[in-house]
């Protein structure tokens, strides 16, 4: 029992003792011993707490570092994008269950058409997306706009691709989940007001989490993002993206277990297989190019059809449905066929496997080229596995004595070849196939097939399927490249406004007076009444006149000015401006807006800013 | 004329009214009009921290073959030579990217909603997001063309109101018009409190030079006090001084002004950058 006033002193040692002294005055016997023991325990406990309370000041202080923030955010984005991938997976399963019993009806061929039409309507009228497959948009946003993506993109492609693929369209769910994950990352970055470079990293985290989750393959997610999406291997990106890939994978494993998508019994790889892989690389390169061009040309064909987008999607879908009556394996994502091929249970003959390659390419082109929604990852895996299977059967038919490991292994190698070829991303192909098949023993032929396929494809197609359009439009701006640096500079920050303006009526004497006050070699000439830009006087070109005093009152500016001046307007790309300066041998050009002179853009200032921007883009600090 | 006003042209009588308002602003301010004649109903504006998708209503695609001709004729009648912006970058084939480095932008109150073309209506969500993200102020036009002869700045002392005041002085410098301040006093603030904010933001000299009237209301309803604002004044205000939740719960001053006043409004958002004259 505390004495009045004593417990108000606070919990220090003296007060504690006083409390117990007060207690002691009122208690006797055993009770005295008990309280004395309790007092000791209390004092020890109190001292321990006191020690703990001072512990944080002794620990090294954790500062809110940018990299730490990105790592934490990366984990959050990885979990969110992993959940998005799971949601699409489960929705697809539900959709496939729903339409499964309808496939027996004679009219079932219209199902992919209905799905694709609904998908186009959803994208165009409900979500108002007005965009394509997804991954190119992510690369474009990373390339030009610091990874800014619309919030609606985080769900739009998930639903639209579910409708397309679930109803039997030939497409993959991977690109939609990449788009979704990337949009989640971008919008989380926006929510926390992160800067451009941090936002780009989180976009990569979203894409990595999604790929890692959907394939249960964290390294494939990481490599895909660095090789394809970000196009840079800086340490600033690698750690958060890796964490996101792990988070995405863990989400997948938590809900689905640690499943390997295309497991097999193991392969005993020999030298013959590695050599044959080079031949397969050639074949997969051929079909990669064919698939790329078929998709592209089908886009052009469908654009010529004067129907609303949903109508075109319906036509494409119905044609896929009809094709599916002959080759059921071409419908949907096609993973079932891959599983059969990898375990060597695919019953079709060589001819059937070869025809299936073309059928799958046609089905995918009809689905995606005519307005369905989805990606090319899964179709590429299917085409690749058919190519591998056909290659194996062809080789063993022609040279039965060659000891090849088995058709399952070649189906697996074919997948790597197609992915490497169409994405021109050999590392992604290698790590993806290693992880989704759970076997490291095929690594040597995997490297060979991926390297050969990428090299040949690059020879015929200057850029991968995802980047071709961007490259053609000059909009693929990778960090640290010339185009990217120039894109990040604006005319506004280069304008030099210290030019002295002259008028056409000015005499040479007056002009010389202006020259004395000026620090520049160029003098814009403006109409004295309207202030319209008329031309320039270049000091180097008129220097002989300046020292001839007889001319001072006989010559006016109008006579020495250059009227055919190349000028810059707002909206001109700096790359084009620099190109004009190079080809015309100019060191500066005037900026003219609405017929008024605004200022000069000089090559020296441009290159100075260029250097500074390049340093910003290539340093590793976010 | 190194400053530019971005205008999305609508080839309809209503669109003509909006464009006339832009031309009038450009003439007074010495600003070059940059006209975008849309070929698609969607476009994207990539701001520093946000991307805004604008879904135009179908009327923006009316008679595309005469759009440029009409816009050019209207601008040339006032001695302006409009630039026509052709999108160079596309996020998707039907989704052009519009640059965001203009000095001003002109919008009707809503650019996505057909119903509020004539009536005042509400400021549409896209216009709000543009205001919220842009470095430039947005001129929200009166439904029909009307000239303005004075400038009224709504000044409540917030950071965004200071932005509006900066903008007011910028326009006053270019047009030679005087500035009128409108303040609905909140709480127990006095005129000195508001003057202190102005001085602290380095606007004391401009205040003396350009402001000729200060409508300071210590009481009365805000909506009723708005009657004192002349009908031919350009209204300048800062947007989003409060959070969205507070705006929803207590109402936004900007929403009240735009729904009560038929005048032309110019709104400076939180990211407004004063680029001087």
Image (spheres, coloured by chain):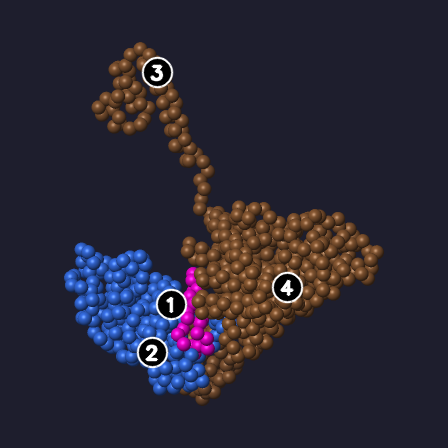
| Chain shaded blue | B
For disc 4, the chain is: A
Of A423 and B208, nearer the camera is: A423
Q: Residue at the location (25% across, 15% down)? A: A26
| Residue A374 percent location from the top left of the image | 55, 64
In the picture of the structure, the residue carrying the numbered disc 2 is B18
Residue A410 drawn at (x, y percent):
72, 56
Question: Chain A shown in which color?
Answer: brown
Q: Are marks 3 and 2 on the same chain?
A: no
Q: Are marks 3 and 1 in contact (CB under 8 Å)?
A: no
Answer with the quarter of the image where residue A419 lies: bottom right
Residue under label 1: B126
Mark in front: 3 vs 2:
3
In the picture of the structure, the residue carrying the numbered disc 4 is A328
The residue at which mark 3 appears reads as A34
Circles 3 and 2: CB distance less than 8 Å? no
Q: Residue furthest bottom?
A: A554
Visible residue check, residue A179: no
């Amino acid at each position: 029992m505390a004495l009045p006033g004593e417990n108000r002193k606070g919990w220090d040692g003296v007060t504690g003792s006083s409390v117990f002294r007060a207690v002691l005055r009122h208690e006797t016997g055993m009770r005295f011993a008990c309280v004395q023991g309790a007092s000791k325990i209390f004092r020890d406990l109190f001292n321990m707490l006191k020690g703990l309370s001072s512990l944080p000041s002794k620990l090294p202080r954790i500062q809110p570092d940018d990299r730490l923030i990105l790592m934490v955010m990366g984990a959050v984005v990885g979990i969110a994008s992993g959940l998005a991938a799971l949601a699409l997976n489960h929705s697809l399963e539900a959709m496939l269950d729903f339409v499964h019993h309808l496939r027996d009806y004679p009219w079932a061929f219209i199902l992919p058409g209905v799905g694709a039409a609904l998908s186009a309507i959803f994208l165009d009228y409900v979500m108002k997306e007005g965009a394509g497959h997804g991954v190119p948009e992510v690369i474009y946003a990373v390339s030009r706009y610091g990874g800014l993506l619309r919030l609606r993109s985080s769900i739009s492609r998930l639903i639209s691709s579910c409708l397309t693929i679930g109803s039997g369209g030939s497409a993959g769910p991977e690109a939609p989940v990449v788009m979704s994950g990337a949009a989640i990352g971008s919008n989380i970055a926006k929510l926390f007001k992160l800067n451009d470079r941090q936002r780009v990293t989180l976009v990569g985290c979203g894409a990595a989490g999604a790929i890692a989750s959907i394939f249960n393959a964290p390294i494939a997610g990481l490599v895909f993002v660095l090789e394809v999406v970000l196009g840079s291997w800086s340490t600033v990106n690698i750690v958060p993206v890796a964490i996101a890939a792990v988070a995405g994978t863990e989400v997948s494993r938590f809900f689905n277990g640690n499943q390997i998508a295309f497991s097999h019994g193991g392969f005993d790889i020999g030298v013959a297989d590695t050599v044959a892989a080079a031949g397969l690389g050639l074949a997969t390169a051929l079909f990669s190019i064919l698939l790329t061009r078929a998709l592209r040309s089908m886009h052009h064909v469908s654009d010529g059809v004067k129907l609303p987008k949903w109508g075109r999607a319906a036509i494409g879908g119905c044609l896929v449905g009809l094709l599916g009556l002959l080759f059921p394996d071409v419908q949907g994502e096609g993973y079932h066929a891959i599983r059969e091929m990898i375990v060597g249970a695919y019953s079709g003959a060589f001819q059937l496997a070869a025809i299936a390659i073309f059928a799958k390419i046609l089905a995918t082109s009809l689905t995606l080229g005519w307005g369905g929604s989805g990606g090319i990852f899964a179709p590429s895996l299917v085409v690749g596995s058919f190519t591998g299977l056909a290659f194996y059967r062809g080789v063993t038919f022609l040279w039965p004595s060659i000891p090849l490991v088995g058709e399952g292994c070649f189906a697996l190698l074919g997948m790597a070849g197609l992915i490497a070829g169409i994405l021109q991303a050999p590392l992604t192909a290698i790590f993806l196939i290693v992880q989704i098949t759970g076997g490291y023993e095929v690594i040597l032929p995997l490297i060979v097939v991926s390297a050969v396929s990428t090299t040949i494809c690059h020879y015929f197609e200057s850029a991968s399927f995802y980047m071709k359009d961007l490259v053609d439009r000059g909009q693929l701006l990778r960090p640290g490249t010339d185009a990217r640096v120039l894109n990040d500079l604006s005319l506004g920050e280069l304008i030099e406004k210290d030019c002295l303006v002259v008028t056409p009526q000015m005499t040479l004497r007056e002009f010389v007076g202006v020259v004395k006050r000026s620090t520049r070699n160029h003098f814009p000439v403006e109409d004295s009444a309207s202030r319209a830009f008329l031309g320039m006087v270049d000091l180097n070109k008129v220097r002989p006149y300046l020292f001839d005093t007889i001319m001072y009152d006989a010559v006016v500016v109008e006579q020495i000015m250059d009227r055919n001046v190349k000028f810059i307007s707002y909206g001109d790309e700096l790359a084009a401006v620099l190109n004009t300066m190079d080809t015309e041998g100019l060191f500066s050009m005037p900026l003219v807006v609405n017929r008024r002179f605004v200022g000069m853009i000089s090559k020296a200032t441009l290159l100075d800013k260029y250097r500074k921007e390049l340093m910003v883009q290539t340093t590793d600090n976010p | 004329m190194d400053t530019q006003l971005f205008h999305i042209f609508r080839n309809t009588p209503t669109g003509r009214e909006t464009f006339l308002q832009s031309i009038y602003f450009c003439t007074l301010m010495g600003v070059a009009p940059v006209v975008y004649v849309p070929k698609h109903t969607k476009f994207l504006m990539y701001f520093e921290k946000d991307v805004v998708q604008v879904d135009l209503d179908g009327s923006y695609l009316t008679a595309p073959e005469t759009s440029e001709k009409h816009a050019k004729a209207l601008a040339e009648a006032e001695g302006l030579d409009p630039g026509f912006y052709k999108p160079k970058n596309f996020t998707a084939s039907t989704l052009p990217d519009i640059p965001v480095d203009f000095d001003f932008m002109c919008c009707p109150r809503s650019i996505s909603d057909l119903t509020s073309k004539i009536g005042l209506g509400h400021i549409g969500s896209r216009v709000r997001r543009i205001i919220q993200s842009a470095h430039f102020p947005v001129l929200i036009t009166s439904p029909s063309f009307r000239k303005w002869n004075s400038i009224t700045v709504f000044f409540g002392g917030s950071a965004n109101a200071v932005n509006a005041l900066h903008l007011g002085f910028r326009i006053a410098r270019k047009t030679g018009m005087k500035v009128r301040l409108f303040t609905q006093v909140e709480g127990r603030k006095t005129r000195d409190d508001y003057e202190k904010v102005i001085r602290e933001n380095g606007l004391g000299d401009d205040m003396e030079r350009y402001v000729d009237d200060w409508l300071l209301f210590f009481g009365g309803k805000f909506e009723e006090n708005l009657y004192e604002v002349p009908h031919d004044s350009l209204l300048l205000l800062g947007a989003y001084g409060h959070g969205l939740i507070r705006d929803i719960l207590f109402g936004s001053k900007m929403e009240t002004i735009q729904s009560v006043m038929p005048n032309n409004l110019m709104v400076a958002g939180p990211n407004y950058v004063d680029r001087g004259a």
